[in-house]
């Protein structure tokens, strides 16, 4: 099944992170998607049924999920859905799994700080066993074991993509520290209510 689904929910378990022998990072977690509705008769919110999903992320998304999300976080997940029936010890049921393509905090419930990380082309293109080393505690990817045929080369400033260069606009920082111009009190001109 190649159906794509987007779900808002709550991370119900601590993300479980592992790295395979071939160097592929995998993070999985359980996601609870509760439903609430306004009951006009009681003038109160009532809880409806909760849908449960097993969410799995791979490669760089897995590493970022492991470093960014915790049990109890409100998130938005999008990915391919798989519905499976199972049977064990005379019992059976249905499980719904999502292979995540994207995942992040649900900003309807709070704020988040986003940090861009460099992508590692080697993660998806190297042969098994020659992939970058991944620190299991932090999820960081290290390319510190150079290939003898390709010694490390220090990137010159011109080799860095403009989006990956740090912002050093001191004029902008100074302007943000100054009060707005045009108002005698230095404020915005809006009356506090």
Image (tube, grey):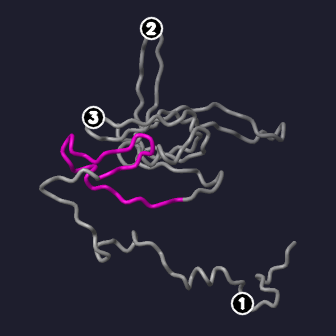
* Residue 133 falls inside the magenta stretch: yes
User: Badge 3: few (under 14), some or many (20 or more) residues near its Cα, within 10 Å?
Assistant: few
Please tell me whether mark 3 sits on a helix, a strand or a loop.
loop
Please tell me whether mark 2 sits on a helix, a strand or a loop.
loop
Q: Which residue is mark 1?
A: 181
Height in image: 104 above or below 181?
Answer: above
Please tell me which of labels 1 and 3 falls first in the chain. Answer: 3
In the depicted view, which residue is nearer to us: 71 or 92? Answer: 71
Q: Which residue is mark 3?
A: 21
Q: CA distance from mark 1 to mark 2?
A: 74 Å
Q: Which residues are magenta?
A: 114-143
Q: Is residue 125 left or right of residue 96?
A: left
Q: Which residue is mark 2?
A: 89
Are the two marked residues, 1 and 3, in contact with CB atoms closer than 8 angstroms?
A: no
Residue that appears at 18% across and 59% down: 151
Height in image: 155 above or below 116?
Answer: below
């Amino acid at each position: 099944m190649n159906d794509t689904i987007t779900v808002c929910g709550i991370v119900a378990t601590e993300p479980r992170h592992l790295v395979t022998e071939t160097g592929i990072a995998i993070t999985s977690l359980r996601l609870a998607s509760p439903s609430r509705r306004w009951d006009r008769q009681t003038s109160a919110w009532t809880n409806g049924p909760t849908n449960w999903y097993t969410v799995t992320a791979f490669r760089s998304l897995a590493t970022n999920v492991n470093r960014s999300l915790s049990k109890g976080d409100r998130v938005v997940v999008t990915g391919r859905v798989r519905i499976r029936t199972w049977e064990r010890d005379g019992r059976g049921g249905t499980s719904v799994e999502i292979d995540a393509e994207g995942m992040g905090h649900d900003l309807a419930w709070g704020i988040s700080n986003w940090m861009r990380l460099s992508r590692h082309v080697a993660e998806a293109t190297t042969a098994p066993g020659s992939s970058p080393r991944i620190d299991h505690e932090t999820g960081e990817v290290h390319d510190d074991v150079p290939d003898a045929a390709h010694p490390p080369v220090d990137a010159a400033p011109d080799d860095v993509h403009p989006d990956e260069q740090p912002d050093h606009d001191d004029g902008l920082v100074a302007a943000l520290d100054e009060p707005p111009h045009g108002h005698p009190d230095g404020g915005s001109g809006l009356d506090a209510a």
